[in-house]
Image (cartoon, rainbow, N blue to C red):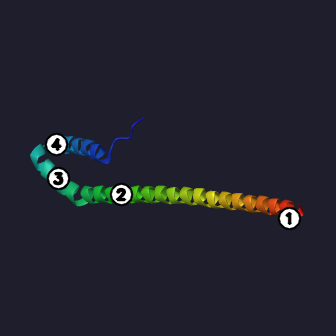
C-alpha cells in the first residue's frame, strides 16, 4: 500500500478543516484559505525543508557507502593479485633454484 506524501496529507487535512470551519462558523472559504495558508507557510514548509534535508543527507550517506564499498572491493582485488604474484614469483624462484641444483650435479 502506497503511503500518501506529506503534501497530499496536508492538502486533505486543510480541505477537511475548511469544511468544518465553514459549517460551524459560516465564514467564507476564502478567509479560511487565507488563514490556513499562513499556517501552512509557518509550520508545513519548514517540515518539508527538513524532510528534504534529511533525504539529501540519506542520499549522501548512501553514495558514500557505495564509494567505500567500491574502494574496499578494489583494494581486496589488488591485495589478492599482489599475493598471487608473490606466490608465482616464489614458485618460479624455487623452480629455478631446483634447476640450478640439478645442473650443478651434472
Q: Pointer 1: what residue?
A: 104
Q: Quadrant of the N terminus?
A: top left
> Mark 3 touching mark 2, by CB under 8 A?
no
Which numbered tag is attached to residue 37? 3
Counting labels gives: 4
Q: CA distance from mark 3 to mark 2?
A: 26 Å
Q: Pointer 4: what residue?
A: 22
Q: CA distance from mark 1 to mark 2?
A: 71 Å
Q: Earlier in the sequence, mark 2 or mark 4?
A: 4
Q: Earlier in the sequence, mark 4 or mark 3?
A: 4
Q: Position of residue 67 (x, y in %)?
A: 47, 58
Q: Quadrant of the C terminus?
A: bottom right
Q: Pointer 2: what residue?
A: 56
Q: Earlier in the sequence, mark 1 or mark 2?
A: 2
Q: Residue at x 38, y 40 (%)?
A: 3
Which numbered tag is attached to residue 51? none
Callout 4 secondary element: helix
Q: Residue at x 71, y 59 (%)?
A: 87
Q: Quadrant of residue 17?
A: top left
Q: Nearer the viewer, mark 1 or mark 2?
A: 1
Q: Relative to 36, is 1 above or below?
A: above
Q: Residue at x 34, y 41 (%)?
A: 4
Q: Relative to 30, is 80 above or below?
A: below
Amino acid at each position: 500500500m502506497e503511503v500518501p506524501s506529506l503534501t497530499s496529507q496536508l492538502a486533505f487535512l486543510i480541505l477537511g478543516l475548511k469544511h468544518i470551519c465553514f459549517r460551524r462558523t459560516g465564514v467564507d472559504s476564502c478567509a479560511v484559505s487565507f488563514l490556513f495558508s499562513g499556517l501552512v507557510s509557518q509550520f508545513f514548509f519548514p517540515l518539508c525543508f527538513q524532510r528534504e534535508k534529511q533525504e539529501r543527507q540519506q542520499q549522501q550517506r548512501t553514495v558514500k557507502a557505495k564509494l567505500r564499498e567500491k574502494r574496499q572491493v578494489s583494494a581486496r582485488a589488488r591485495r589478492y593479485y599482489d599475493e598471487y604474484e608473490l606466490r608465482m614469483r616464489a614458485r618460479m624462484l624455487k623452480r629455478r633454484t631446483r634447476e640450478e641444483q640439478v645442473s650443478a650435479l651434472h
